[in-house]
Image (spheres, rainbow, N blue to C red):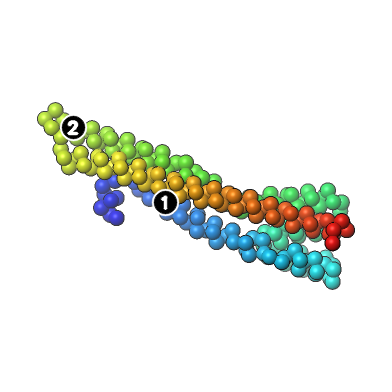
Amino acid sequence: MLSIIEKAGWSIWPLIFASILALAIIGERFWSLRAQLVSPKGLLQGLLQELQSKGIAQEMLNRLVKSSPLGRIFSAALRNANSSREIMKEAIEEEGRAVAHELERFLNTLGTIATAAPLWGLFGSVLGMVELFGSLRPTGSNPAELAHGISVVLYNTALGLIVAIVALIFYRYFRARVDSIVLDMEQQAIKLVEVLHGERK
């Protein structure tokens, strides 16, 4: 590994840092976007049963806020349970936007890495080409300098593409996952509103 870094030149270090950062974000997002953490199964059903037996209590609202992002949306709806359906929906939408923003955390960074990595790889390749042409002289070329220039070009291009491809794949995956989670939470929140207003059982 160290020999590859030496052959690729100093320009490969930002790509190595970007790859480590991308892997850290991917791992963190896999952990944070687990279904049981964001939108626990049975939360709505359990809440409806608790509402029928005990009604709305401050302790319940506090517990919902701490439980999960979906619980925060339910809590926003219940705090406005005595208001009109439109006001409840506005409260849900406001909290939903805040929750969606948190679920999208670090995704812009991952998208930036996917965009910038091939450009930085290209920059490293240009440096390698400069070194490559610098080794060509009228009296002949230095094989060691020629080989080093080719190494810089190939390693930077390859690593830049690898980092970009991996980052782009997971950026798209997490973006679709967040959209799916937000849609599911919206549907559950609408069901809660309809139940509270007697439009649904």
Image side of residue 157 versus residue 92, left or right? left
Q: Quadrant of the C terminus?
A: bottom right
Q: In this view, which residue lies farthest toward the left?
A: 139
Q: Quadrant of the N terminus?
A: bottom left
Which residue occupies 55% across, 61% down? 31
Look at label 1 and name its amino acid: Ser
Look at label 2 and name its amino acid: Leu
Instruction: Give percent across and percent down for residue 81.
Output: 84, 58
Q: CA distance from mark 1 to mark 2?
A: 33 Å
Which residue occupies 24% across, 36% down? 131
Closer to the N terminus: mark 1 or mark 2? 1
According to the picture, the residue beneath numbered tag 2 turns out to be 136
According to the picture, the residue beneath numbered tag 1 turns out to be 19
Instruction: Give percent across and percent down for residue 160.
Output: 39, 44
Which residue occupies 22% across, 33% down? 134
Asked whether the beta carbons under mark 1 and mark 2 sit within 8 Å of each other, the answer is no
